[in-house]
Image (spheres, helix red, strand yellow):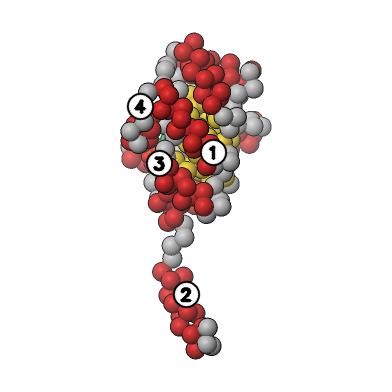
Amino acid sequence: MKFFIDTANLAHIREANALGILDGVTTNPSLMAKEGIKGEAAIAAHYKTICDIVDGDISAEVLSTTFEEMVEEGKKLVAIHPNIVVKVPMIKDGIKAIKWFTDNGIKTNCTLIFSAGQAILAAKAGATYVSPFIGRIDDSGWDGVQLIEQIARVFAIQGFKTEILAASIRNANHIIACAEAGAHVCTCPLDSILGLLKHPLTDIGLAKFIEDAAKMGA
Ligand code: G3P
């Protein structure tokens, strides 16, 4: 399973990348706005900086919602760096745009996926990734991981090449459950990635090893 970081924060991206396990980055308009990025030039410069830090797929989301505008925006985004993946919302024009990008050799990430039917449509259009938002599904009283399992079953039966990119991850348990459910990628906030490191018995065990190492003259 690939690990992406879900943020536009450069410090978090650098910290996760330094672990050596990062395969890519996902952003969205809310995450970009949170970093105070404003205007076309600043947006492009920020994506370029992210691409220079991480060698992997970098999802950059279109801000428009019509087919023509999304295609124009996507063309500009991929001109920033060859690793840019155009992130497109799951709407009718979004599906048309994904098909256009696919036919023109441009990678896409279909975002705001909340059902298997939406994932099937995006896969039919040739999306590189579909992004089911599992945390937001859990927040609404459904089961986000069950949706990952369902999409993984459908894609395996149908032989779709589209990768399942589990998004809206809220904690380390989500990552483990998505790995078990068949997600190809988890995109996670830094805290959730670092949460995988933690176990009290590791800390207790290491403290004892350090104590005993001192007895050996280390
Ligand atoms: O990148 C989109 C997704 O991961 C959003 O997560 O926490 O806003 O539901 P969240």
Between marks 2 and 3, how big is the CA–CA gap?
32 Å
Q: Is mark 1 within 8 Å of ligand 1?
A: no
Q: Which residue is mark 1?
A: 52
> Crowding at label 3, few (<14), some or many (≥20) Cα neighbours within 10 Å?
some
Which residue shows up at 46% across the image and 57% down it?
A: 196
Which residue shows up at 56% across the image and 51% down it?
A: 21
> Crowding at label 2, few (<14), some or many (≥20) Cα neighbours within 10 Å?
few
First reached walking from the N terminus: tag 4 or tag 2: 4
First reached walking from the N terminus: tag 2 or tag 1: 1
Between marks 1 and 3, how big is the CA–CA gap?
14 Å
Label number found at residue 206: 2
- Secondary structure of the residue carrying tag 1 is helix
First reached walking from the N terminus: tag 1 or tag 3: 3
Which residue shows up at 54% across the image and 38% down it?
A: 52
First reached walking from the N terminus: tag 2 or tag 3: 3
Q: Please name which of the two marks, 4 or 2, marks the residue nearer to the observer.
A: 4
First reached walking from the N terminus: tag 1 or tag 4: 4
